[in-house]
Amino acid sequence: MAYNKRIDGRKFDEIREMKAQVGIIPNADGSAMFQIGKTIALAAVYGPRELFPKFLQNSDRGILRCYYNMMSFSGSGERVRPGPSRRSKEISYITENALLPALNLEDFPNSVVDVYIELLQTDAGTRCAGITAAAMALADAGFQMKDLVSAASVGFIENRLIVDVSNEEEHYEKGNTDIPIAMMPRTGEITLLQMDGFASKEELAEGIIVAKAVCMEIYKVQQEALKARYKK
Amino acid sequence: MKDIVRTHVVSLLNKDARLDGRKLDEYRKFTIEYGISSKSAEGSARVKMGDTEVVGGVKFLVGPTYPDTPDKGTIVANVELLPLSSPVFETGPPSIQSIEYARAIVDRGLRESDALDMRKLCIKRGEKMWTVMIDVYSINDAGNLADAIGLVAIAALKDAKFPKYDAEKDIINYEERTKKGLELKYLPIPITIVKIGSKFIIDPTVEEENAAETRLTVTTIEDGRACAIQKGGEGTLTPEDIDKMIQLSIEKGKELRKLFK
């Protein structure tokens, strides 16, 4: 049986409904909420601020620290144990790398920019939602950025290209390929690329082209949310 | 800087005024939203009072009963003061403040009020019980997290529905929820009163908290009885102070209770 119809009824190139808002956390220097389907990510930026202990400081440029965390009740099965895990540490790390190319931290030597990402509810695509929310929060904080960073996954089920892979599709019994991608949509420069599962060179190339179109859609939602803050 | 603000808070209070123009016994705008993480959590809620925001979620799990209470289930409360919510909160293991909130406000309020009948959480005497896990997170700290945390925990519990449990296979099916909720006999409402100089105020902002030497969180139930008390801060209280503070928390508890549906 070929994968002719997506489990949740979406079109193959259709992403889930999105919502975005910035300035949701008054204490933070910048903040944002990004929801895609049922996945909800919150992000807050604090900084640039002084970095302690001092030996961690870099006199050439500021340091970006990202913290990705799933709230204990945000998983679909059992309660998630609080505190960092190997998974959350890896995601925090790739999130830093996904955001850094858009920032110009040379302006802030010896300081740190902390980005906290909290998942309130998860239903696939949490790292991409976290990166998307964090980019908005950084823009909300007033950082000069080369561009926003938008992130989404593309994938393959039985050689059929799908976008914004759902939780059910991630667990498709005959196998699934999941490719989270983040990019600066204006230039198309890719800042995150991961893949679980198989894809040919041609399929991957096709996936990246489609991912760009998907990121453009997310980019628009991010921009609208940032503009909305100043419309009031 | 902190000292200037503190002096200002105190001098305003001497004229019965507050920084944000509220009366001494006036709460900020208070809202409850239920089911904010309904896909993942069996119960969830968000509480906002002014700019202070917290979220809470309930997850159920099944495990062996405790040897000393073979006919009861249990609740476990956990509070995290997220660095996302304030520049002064740090990453790392739970701070003493978050432990105090979890134990002294959420857990004690529920346990000592007997609001939740732990016997009803027993599945099979001496063998299997439900554990109700309540996790609360701060989203923005603009003061009075203590009340917000206690109140969101109650709201999340009210929102909760048991997941389907297959006793034979000993498996919880989190995908499927039953219609059965947690019966709360009472709504234990925590109200924190802070003492600044000789004045008592409720729902303090961060500036007011920093100016206060003593606080008292009093949790009351419907009939006006207190079921949990926690004194905080380094200052002292006289028996007369305590009397006034408890009276205030009973009155405010009644007002806030009406907002829970």
Image: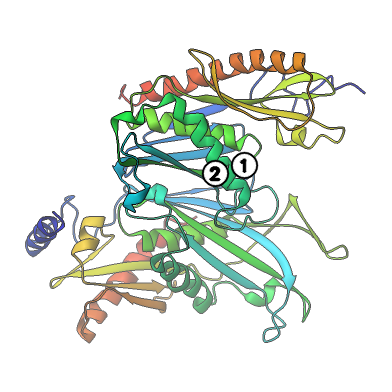
Q: Which residue is under mark 1? A: A122
Subunit of mark 1?
Answer: A
Label 1 CA crowd tier, 10 Å (few <14, some 14–19, many 20+): many
Q: Which residue is under mark 2? A: A119
The residue at the point 72 percent across, 29 percent down is A178
The residue at the point 23 percent across, 77 percent down is B244
Q: Is residue B159 visible?
A: yes
Across and down, in percent, residue A154 comes to: 68, 23
- In the rendered structure, the answer to whether residue A182 lies left or right of residue B17 reads right
Across and down, in percent, residue B90 comes to: 39, 55
Q: Classify mark 1: helix, strand or loop.
A: loop
Up/down of A16 relative to A56, above or below: above
Q: Quadrant of the N terminus of chain B?
A: bottom left
Up/down of B109 relative to A124, above or below: below
Q: Mark 1 near mark 2, Cβ–Cβ under 8 Å?
A: yes
The residue at the point 83 percent across, 20 percent down is A159
The residue at the point 51 percent across, 16 percent down is A185
Across and down, in percent, residue A189 comes to: 53, 17
- In the rendered structure, the answer to whether residue A32 lies left or right of residue A189 reads left
Marks 1 & 2 on one chain: yes
Q: Nearer the viewer, residue B245 or A16?
A: A16
Q: Amino acid at mark 1?
A: Thr
Q: Which mark is residue B29?
A: none
Q: Quadrant of residue A119?
A: top right
Across and down, in percent, residue A58 comes to: 35, 40
Subunit of mark 2?
Answer: A
Q: Is residue A130 visible?
A: no
